[in-house]
Amino acid sequence: ATIFSAIDMAPRDPILGITEAFNADTNPAKINLGVGVYYDDNGKVPLLACVRKAEELLMEQPAPRTYLPIEGLAAYDAAVQELVFGAGSAIIQEKRAVTVQAIGGTGALKIGADFLQRFAPGSEVYISDPSWENHRALFESAGFTVNTYRYYDAATRGVDFAGMLADLKAMPKGAIVLLHACCHNPTGADITAAQWDDVIAAIGAGGLIPFLDMAYQGFGTGIAEDGAVVGKFAAAGGPLLISNSFSKSFSLYGERVGALSVVGASAEEAARLLSQLKRVVRTNYSNPPVHGGKVVALALTTPELRQLWEDELAGMRVRIKEMRNTFVQKLKEKAPAHDFEFVREQVGMFSYSGLTRQQVERLRLEHSIYAVDTGRICVAALNSKNIDRVIDAIAKVL
Ligand code: PLP
């Protein structure tokens, strides 16, 4: 026996487990709604034209693959700041924000968690109940105790905002609060602009550290509209961390393009923060990969490509909304006793559909339709060809 002999098998990732079961299903009509990926109306992951054009431009002048700086490509980091804080924002002008390119949104969260572990080691971390599966694991792996604050209310199919606010007010000073900036995953339930104001006030009054996770900017109302909450937090002062990701908004999942931005009280403080963030990156993976960062930087800063991207992202956003409407309308016809109107109000790629674990199981076993046990479905995996089969199956299991 060696030291490895006694190691247990790690639990399976619940979402990846669905994909494994889906892949093993031999029914040609199978449908996977368990994913966290945007599919187009043909059921394909799109390769955006803005990405293809940016890659063509890059190929015209092939560059050697030297190391990037630890914090990533300067043009990328600057473009991220404009997107996240809004072009011309005071935070940028005052140089109070620092940004490091990261390995996707996940990498940004991990850099942020490791950074906070160095400088706020005793803090409690709070995530929404429920949240993206990996939030808890990421912060626990960085050494934090992770708690939840009330968020989803199954009875109203919306946010238990009174509960959320009460929990925020009861958090110990210095606690780290992870918030979904928009398009809450997994529920699809967001809070309103007025409710954000109350959240920001409670965080300020409680001396809490907000960490905004923005993996779906542009999938809610629009790029600027979805990002507005970041500007509000930044304007309120106090420490602030933002992780963002281009996995979904550029359909660049496998390129791993994201960033972590941290806001300090002054340019001088920000410089110190950057020096420490670089240490965290250096000891994790030294520096980020080149290609995805170059593609995104070029697309964001070349006017023609930028317009193309905004149009393509709007196309994804609108298609998801259309699928929500179609889903609700068709279910109204097939299952008039059940009210799915709430699906129209939800935002982003996901919907907590209200389907029970048993109903999800019947969808899988009887119809080869795969969803998450919690009832989460990916609305972006619905399309004009598969929706009728999905609706018929749901009507049968209700
Ligand atoms: N945060 C949330 C809420 C997510 O849903 C995701 C991806 O599903 C991420 C972060 C991670 O994004 P990435 O794939 O860029 O690591």
Image: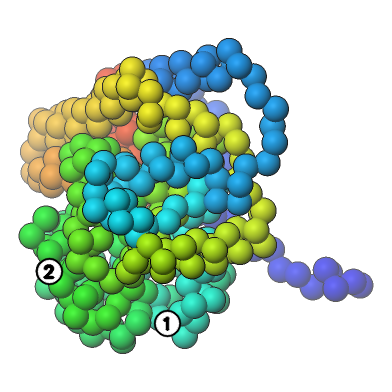
Q: Where residue 149 sits: x, y (%)? A: 28, 73
Residue at x-position 31% and y-position 85%? 173
Q: Which mark is residue 198?
A: 2
Q: Look at 15% across and 72% down and name the residue there.
A: 201
Closer to the chain start, of discs 2 and 1, is 1
Q: Is mark 2 within 8 Å of ligand 1?
A: no
Dividing the image into 4 quarters, which one contains the N terminus? bottom right
- Along the horizontal axis of the image, is 374 left or right of 273? left
Query: What residue type is disc 1 on?
Result: Ser
- Crowd around label 2: few <14 · some 14–19 · many ≥20 (10 Å): few
Specify whether residue 325 is in view.
Answer: yes
Q: Residue at 49%, 77% (x, y): give it.
A: 119
User: Which percent across, then down, holds residue 127?
Assistant: 35, 68
Dot 1 corresponds to which residue?
123
Q: Does any portion of residue 150 appear in the rendered image?
A: no
Residue toward you, 122 or 25:
122
Tell me, for residue 312, which label it has, or none.
none
Compared to 179, does 339 lie above or below? above
